[in-house]
Image (cartoon, rainbow, N blue to C red):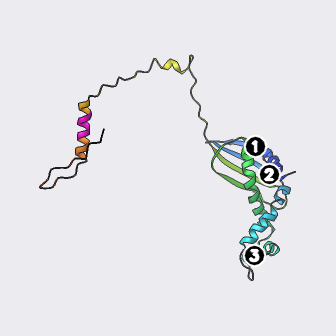
């Protein structure tokens, strides 16, 4: 079974619980066999970050890094790497559209058995429209009054533009009149 198929099976085993305020909780377990496929990558990642005397950072042998950090740290990193791949598959299998970052918690620590995981997500809220009256929304068209827009005279437009230009005019000095901004070209 490929890693993708394993993740799809794991995602199907998660249960969904709807929470208040458009939140969802997905709970399940990741089998130890799936976590084991990520252990080598987790150990490489940890070895690249560990500092040991006599070794440059990033060049620590994996077996020495394992002795320094311990098996539990490697398993925790393996769970983290697994969740990076599992999360998109989980979202697709549950057919949900989350908003923002998930809150991922380990409920059963990685000690060689299945790892319990709880993922809490916020979803887009559902909006329910009121019932459509018999005959559809078109029935409202005759009930809505539309205000008539009064005709605007060219003189009123010219007066408004003159007031705006005067408000933006440069300040006069003792010897000059105020300078109005240029009229836009038509």
Q: Which residue is mark 1?
A: 93
Q: Position of residue 173 (x, y in %)?
A: 15, 55
10 Å neighbourhood of mark 2: few (<14), some, or many (≥20)?
Answer: some
10 Å neighbourhood of mark 1: few (<14), some, or many (≥20)?
Answer: some
* Mark 3 or mark 2: whose residue is earlier in sequence: 2
Could you tell me which residue is drawn at 73 percent across and 42 percent down?
94
Front position in the image: 117 or 124: 124
Over which residues does the magenta segment extend?
A: 157-162
Q: Which residue is mark 3?
A: 59
Could you tell me which residue is drawn at 40 percent across and 21 percent down?
145
Give how far apart the Cα atoms at labels 1 and 2 are. 15 Å
Q: Is 55 on the left-hand or right-hand side of 158?
A: right
Q: Up-down: is 160 above or below 61?
A: above
Does the CB distance between marks 1 and 2 fall below 8 Å?
no
Could you tell me which residue is drawn at 22 percent across and 44 percent down?
166
Could you tell me which residue is drawn at 59 percent across and 34 percent down?
127
Give how far apart the Cα atoms at labels 3 and 2 are. 34 Å
Q: Is residue 148 magenta?
A: no
Tell me the chief SS of the magenta region: helix
């Amino acid at each position: 079974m490929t890693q993708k198929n394993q993740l799809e099976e794991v995602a199907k085993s998660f249960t969904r619980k709807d929470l208040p305020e458009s939140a969802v909780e997905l709970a399940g377990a990741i089998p130890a066999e799936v976590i084991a496929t990520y252990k080598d990558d987790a150990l490489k990642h940890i070895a690249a970050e560990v500092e040991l005397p006599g070794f440059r950072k990033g060049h620590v042998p994996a077996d020495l890094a394992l002795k320094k950090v311990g098996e539990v740290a490697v398993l925790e990193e393996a769970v983290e790497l697994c969740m990076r791949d599992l999360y998109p598959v989980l979202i697709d299998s549950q057919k949900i559209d989350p908003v923002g970052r998930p809150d991922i918690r380990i409920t059963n620590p990685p000690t060689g058995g299945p790892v319990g995981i709880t993922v809490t997500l916020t979803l887009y809220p559902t909006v329910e429209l009121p019932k459509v009256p018999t005959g559809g929304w078109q029935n409202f068209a005759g009930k809505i009054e539309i205000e008539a827009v009064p005709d605007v005279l060219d003189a009123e437009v010219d007066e408004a533009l003159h007031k705006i230009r005067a408000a933006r005019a440069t300040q006069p000095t003792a010897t000059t009149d105020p300078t109005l901004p240029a009229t836009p070209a038509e």
